[in-house]
Image (spheres, rainbow, N blue to C red):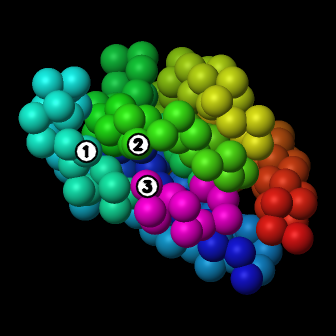
Amino acid sequence: MKKILAFGASSSKASINQQFAIYVARQIKEAEVIEVDLNDYEMPIYSVDRQRENGIHPLALSFKELLKSCDGLVISFAEHNGAYSTAFKNIFDWISRIDKNVWEEKPMLILSTAPGSRGGATVFGIAHAKFTRMNPNTVKGVSLPFFHKNFSKEVGVLDTELAEVLKGSIHDFEHMLTDQVG
């Protein structure tokens, strides 16, 4: 059974990106979903001075070990002022100091959603551009607009066109996981 690390890149306790990431991860066949709440990895804001004085924060080391233990990642990005949330960016900054292979070349399925018409499209584009350069095993999912109109916990993505795109992305991700694990 494959282990999938899934999280919304947000610190909101009611994160729609968390809901979306978990839902999508649960659609992956023969997978154990490990749900992560970024609030469990809250650390001081990364700085070279802090690292020099205190070393790598223990929560960053813990997050990195969790990442190493999984077979793939499903991340749904919250958009804060057109970029990553501070919670995600801080974890990303800390773990990038552990080693340059930040994502361990694990298959990644990236997503975003928002209540508005763009669905976090700006951060989705940033994440896709960044992570495909860092990790050749990155699969582009969907940017889901109007989350409350286009998503149901019971059904999933309600917009038929976006549901088909997501289905194809999940298929590609599963194929990548099989190649990686198999």
Disc 1 and disc 2 in contact, CB within 8 angstroms:
yes
For mark 3, does the 10 Å Cα neighbourhood hold few (<14), some (14 to 19), or many (20 or more) residues?
many
Residue at 70%, 29% in the rendered image = 132
Which comes before the other along the chain, label 3 or label 2?
A: 3
Q: Residue 42 carries which label?
A: none
Q: Is residue 165 above or below residue 15?
A: above
Q: Residue 66 at x, y = what percent? A: 46, 65
Disc 3 and disc 2 in contact, CB within 8 angstroms:
yes
Q: In this view, does 148 lie to the left or right of 25?
A: left
Q: Which residue lies furthest to the left in this view?
A: 53
Disc 3 and disc 1 in contact, CB within 8 angstroms:
no
Q: What residue type is labelled 1?
A: Ile
Q: What residue type is labelled 2?
A: Ile
Can the viewer see residue 20 in this picture?
yes
Q: Which amino acid does label 3 sit on?
A: Lys
Please tell me which residue lies in front, 132 or 169: 132
Which image quadrant for residue 21? bottom right
Quarter the C terminus occupies: bottom right
Which comes before the other along the chain, label 3 or label 1?
A: 1
Magenta span of residues: 64-73
Is label 2 in a helix, a strand or a loop?
Answer: loop
Which image quadrant for residue 173? bottom right
Pointer 3 residue: 64
Pointer 2 residue: 98
Q: Nearer the viewer, mark 3 or mark 2?
A: 2
Q: Is residue 27 above or below residue 121?
A: below
Is label 3 in a helix, a strand or a loop?
Answer: helix
For mark 2, does the 10 Å Cα neighbourhood hold few (<14), some (14 to 19), or many (20 or more) residues?
some
